[in-house]
């Protein structure tokens, strides 16, 4: 009976170790998800600091067949106008397969701040844009 108890405890410990070891969310990703209220079922890609030139589009690869074009315009009152174009191939859009998906978004951002725009239902991209004039 004592040996059975030890075996059960050992198996339970091994199961907990494997479960914790297989966690797919790193502490850094968990913090991003918390900071920007990102759902756990949406993939996140952290681009870190993205260096841009004012008014010049920058193409960023987000993986196989996924691209993001970022353009920043410096506005008065210390604001950046961010223009994003996300393009992906062979993705699901509202539950339906799509050969090509494209989405445009535009928002204002204060210099030095991070942002986490949604790229459709497919991805959230976290970045801290810096702009050289």
Image (spheres, rainbow, N blue to C red):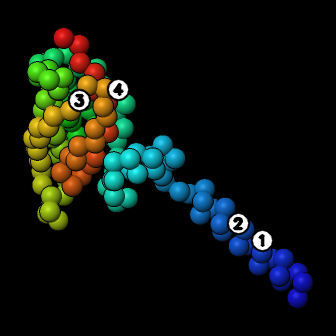
Q: Report the Cα–Cα distance between label 3 and label 2.
A: 48 Å
Instruction: Mark 1 or mark 3: name the one nearer the start of the chain.
Output: 1
Q: Position of residue 49 (x, y in %)?
A: 35, 26
Q: Residue at x 83, y 82 (%)?
A: 5
The image quarter in which residue 14 lies: bottom right
Secondary element at image label 4: strand
Secondary element at image label 3: loop
Which of the two marks, 1 or 3, is nearer to us in this view? 3
Secondary element at image label 1: helix
Q: Residue furthest top?
A: 133
Q: Nearer the viewer, residue 67 or 48?
A: 48
Instruction: Mark 4 or mark 1: name the one nearer the start of the chain.
Output: 1
Q: Nearer the viewer, residue 4 or 82?
A: 82
Q: Are marks 4 and 3 in contact (CB under 8 Å)?
A: no
Q: Which residue is mark 1?
A: 10
Q: Report the Cα–Cα distance between label 4 and label 2.
A: 40 Å
In the rendered image, is residue 63 in sight? no
Q: Which residue is mark 4?
A: 49
Q: Which residue is mark 3?
A: 110
Q: Position of residue 115 (x, y in %)?
A: 28, 38
The image quarter in which residue 75 lies: top left
In the rendered image, is residue 46 in sight? yes
Quarter of the picture containing the N terminus is bottom right
Circle 2 Cα neighbour tier, 10 Å, few/some/many (<14 / 14–19 / ≥20): few
Q: Report the Cα–Cα distance between label 4 and label 1.
A: 45 Å
Q: Position of residue 102 (x, y in %)?
A: 10, 44
Circle 3 Cα neighbour tier, 10 Å, few/some/many (<14 / 14–19 / ≥20): some
Q: Which residue is mark 2?
A: 14
Q: Residue at x 14, y 62 (%)?
A: 94
Q: Report the Cα–Cα distance between label 4 and label 3.
A: 14 Å
Q: Residue furthest front?
A: 77
Q: Nearer the viewer, residue 108 or 30?
A: 108
């Amino acid at each position: 009976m004592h040996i059975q108890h030890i075996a059960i405890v050992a198996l339970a410990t091994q199961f907990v170790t494997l479960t914790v070891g297989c966690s797919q969310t790193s502490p850094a990703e968990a913090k991003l998800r918390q900071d920007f209220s990102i759902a756990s079922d949406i993939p996140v890609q952290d681009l870190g600091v993205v260096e841009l030139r004012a008014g010049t589009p920058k193409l960023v690869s987000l993986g196989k067949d996924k691209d993001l074009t970022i353009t920043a315009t410096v506005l008065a009152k210390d604001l950046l106008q961010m223009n994003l174009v996300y393009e992906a191939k062979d993705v699901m859009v509202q539950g339906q397969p799509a050969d090509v998906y494209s989405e445009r978004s535009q928002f204002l951002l204060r210099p030095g701040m991070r942002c986490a725009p949604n790229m459709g239902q497919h991805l959230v991209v976290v970045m801290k844009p810096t702009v050289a004039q």
